[in-house]
Image (cartoon, rainbow, N blue to C red):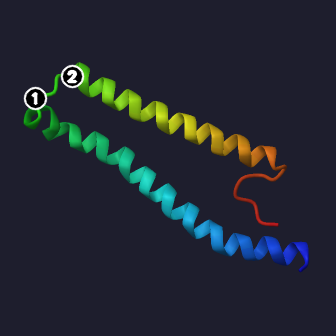
């Protein structure tokens, strides 16, 4: 199988999955902000507890985002490029 055809085939199969994962991660980040409005009163969280939870969520997001970016650049291809 030619290398260009292989990249095309992998791209068609992997990119939709990665896009769906990105959308899910974005919705999670947005929902954390909206959830704060009722979560503080319903669960009787203090601002400190909410800040700790949001910070832990951000740290996890940052670690995985950094890892994805470094693996993309380590492969020698620009992220999101077609080729």
How many numbered marks are there? 2
Q: Report the mark closest to the observer, 2 or 1.
A: 1
Q: Residue at x 64, y 67 (%)?
A: 14
Which element type, helix, strand or loop, lies under badge 2? helix
**Observer-nearest residue: 9 or 83?**
9
Q: Which mark is residue 7?
A: none
The quadrant holding residue 7 is bottom right
Which element type, helix, strand or loop, lies under badge 1? loop
Name the quarter where the N terminus is drawn.
Answer: bottom right
The quadrant holding residue 66 is top right
Q: Residue furthest front?
A: 1
Against 33, residue 51 (above or below) is above
**Observer-nearest residue: 7 or 37?**
7
Residue, disc 1:
44
- Residue 41, horizontal then vertical, whole percent: 9, 33
**Observer-nearest residue: 82 or 3?**
3
Residue 73 placement, left or right of 68 = right
Against 46, residue 20 (above or below) is below
Residue, disc 2:
47
Q: Residue at x 70, y 58 (%)?
A: 80
The quadrant holding residue 50 is top left
Q: Residue at x 87, y 74 (%)?
A: 4
- Residue 28, horizontal then vertical, whole percent: 37, 49
Residue 43 placement, left or right of 56 = left
């Amino acid at each position: 199988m030619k290398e260009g055809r292989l990249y095309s085939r992998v791209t068609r199969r992997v990119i939709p999955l990665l896009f769906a994962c990105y959308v899910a991660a974005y919705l999670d980040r947005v929902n954390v902000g909206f959830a704060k409005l009722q979560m503080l009163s319903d669960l009787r969280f203090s601002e400190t507890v909410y800040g700790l939870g949001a910070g832990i969520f951000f740290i996890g997001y940052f670690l995985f985002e950094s890892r994805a970016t470094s693996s993309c650049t380590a492969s020698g291809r620009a992220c999101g490029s077609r080729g």
